[in-house]
Image (cartoon, helix red, strand yellow):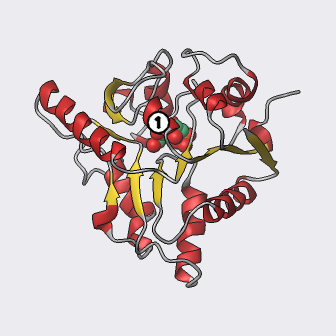
Amino acid sequence: MKVLVFDSEIEASKKAYDILKENITENSTLGLATGSTPLNLYKCMIEDCKNGNISFKNIKTFNLDEYVNLEYTHPQSYHYFMNDNLFDHIDIDKNNTFLPDAIAETDEELNNLCSKYNDMLNNNTIDVQILGIGTNGHIGFNEPGTSFDSTVSVVDLTESTIKDNSRFFENNLDKVPKRAISMGLKNIMAAKTIILLAFGEHKKEAIDHLINGNITEDWPCTILQNHPNVYVVIDKAAEPTK
Ligand code: F6R
């Protein structure tokens, strides 16, 4: 695991973009995340594409997760987020962008959607997976206690994640979806290269576990210690105290 610490989120995101570029070709497959953390990285991708330095025309993407039954026209759905913050601004073919389909009437249907997404992931190799991290150490929406063998599944968000994400839902806990479909830890570990980003003091404890902690399902991020090619790109505020 390579840990890179920067003075600012902007510098860290620029470095993350350099690492991303070094590890892809023009027809690579990317694993993408939502949330606040990757926004500056996505801005780097947009700027570089607009300047004609890179094309995403033949790039394929798979996102980590999507809220259950949040309409894709909802600004906080991850489908909407990805279009708004990345896909609408680069030359990617949207037919090559995939997120878990998470709209269903029954749990049986949801489970079928999980199997479908899992099959798609098994039929593709993610060259570079971008990750954020929850304050409780989740990656994707794999909350504490998730099996290290997990594949795509319907997950219940923990109280702490619902609270953390309420900032996107008018600070109203009732408005935050309580379930999501998420790639499992096994899917994430199958990526060739992983770039995990984290910014801010509130991520420090999770980063400490990620880098220095025992490998345990109580801190899902610690599974990354078993991956041969992980970059942890953080700002000083998120750096564990030595
Ligand atoms: C997002 C995801 C989550 C976030 C994490 C951090 O697709 O899977 O694991 O990366 O919750 O969220 P932010 O970046 O908003 O702090």
For the question of whether residue 195 can be seen, the reply is yes
Q: Is residue 26 left or right of residue 153?
A: right
Q: Residue 77 versus residue 180: which sits nearer the camera?
A: 180
Q: Find out if the beta carbon at label 1 lies less than 8 Å from the nearest ligand 1 atom.
A: yes
Return the residue found at the far bottom: 52
* Label 1 SS: loop
Image quarter of the C terminus: top right
Q: Residue at x 72, y 30 (%)?
A: 204
State the residue at coordinates (24%, 44%): 101
The quadrant holding residue 135 is top right
Marks counted in the figure total 1
Q: Can you say whether 182 is above or below 42 in the image?
A: above
Residue furthest left as drawn: 105
Q: Residue at x 34, y 25 (%)?
A: 155
Answer above or below: position of 139 versus 11.
above
Q: Is residue 241 left or right of residue 197?
A: right
In x, y percent, where is residue 62? 39, 51
Q: Nearer the viewer, residue 183 or 169?
A: 183
Q: Residues within 10 Å of mark 1 (few under 14, many from 20)?
A: many
* Residue type indicated by callout 1: Gly
Place of residue 8 in the rendered image (x, y in percent of width and height, measured from the top left): 76, 53
Q: Mark yes or no: residue 178 visible.
A: no
Residue 91 x %, y %: 41, 76
**Residue 212: x and y, percent?**
76, 24
Q: Which residue is mark 1?
A: 140
Quarter of the image for residue 1 reads: top right
Q: Is residue 179 left or right of residue 89?
A: left
- Residue at image point 57% right, 36% down: 133
Establish if 70 lies above or below 52: above
Q: Nearer the viewer, residue 27 or 62?
A: 27
